[in-house]
Amino acid sequence: MDTKMYRNILFFIVIAISNTGCPDKCINPEYHFEVEASIKPDNEAIKIGDTIFVESHFSESLLDVETNMIIEYSNAKKIGSNIGFTNLDFYGNLNYNSILDFSYVSISGQIYNSKDIPLPNQVNQLTYEYANNEYKLKIGIIPRKKGIYLLGLGNGLSLGRKNTKECDQASFSITLSNTDQHLYLFEDVYGNLSEYDRQRSYCFRVVD
């Protein structure tokens, strides 16, 4: 599978998940926000049974990149995203179940798996938690098997806000920051990722 296809699959999945349950008239997001996530510890190698944490949090006051206006986007019904895993020994094999190579812990928000989406063997869903005027996500990922892995974050989409007359959805461009991403583990073998993918991908080795 080439890198463009990998990106398109993740984008398709997050849209499919996040649109579930919203009326047809609400499919196009009204707002477009940019937020960040980080991964710690960001060591190139991690041992089986250790934990890496994916964390993202942002205020309800957000800059809409389309209008350059601050939007008070409070009480979202749901902000959903996803996280994909690829064991590079099986890169391009969509039948390999990378999800089972890890265990998962929800700390703030939730990570879960649904069989109702494309490629449930490669992708888990994420949901942010809303509290104290901000949205939070923190999950733990615990490797169970040796290998070299590529982790990819999908963009997010809300299902509108509570107590509003309209389904005012918002899209969230989620990129990695303050993280050593070790992308050479992928690019030295398979070629350069696009800039879009570089902003959302993380590579690491799992060792004994």
Image (cartoon, rainbow, N blue to C red):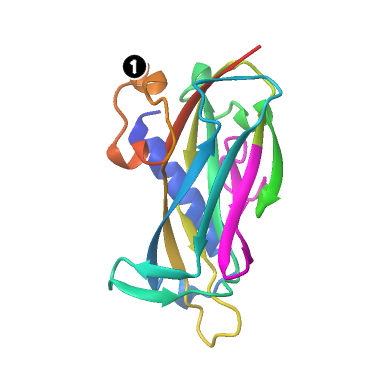
Percent position (x, y) of residue 104? Answer: 70, 38
Residue 72 location (% of width, % of height): 46, 77
178 vs 199, nearest the viewer: 178
Q: Residues within 10 Å of mark 1 (few under 14, many from 20)?
A: few
Q: Would residue 62 be seen by someone viewing this image from the given angle?
A: yes
Q: Is residue 137 above or below residue 150?
A: below
Q: Specify the farthest residue to the top.
A: 208
> Magenta span has 6?
no
Residue 199 coordinates in the image, percent (x, y): 36, 41
Is residue 137 found inside the magenta-colored segment of the image? yes
Q: Quadrant of the N terminus?
A: top left
Task: Place residue 18 in its image quadrant.
Answer: bottom right
Q: Dot 1 corresponds to which residue?
A: 188
Left or right: where 169 falls relative to 114 = left
Tell me the element at label 1.
helix
Q: Residue at 57% of width from left, 42% of height from top?
A: 54
Q: Which residues are magenta?
A: 112-140
Q: Position of residue 143 (x, y in %)?
A: 66, 25
Q: Quadrant of residue 34?
A: bottom left
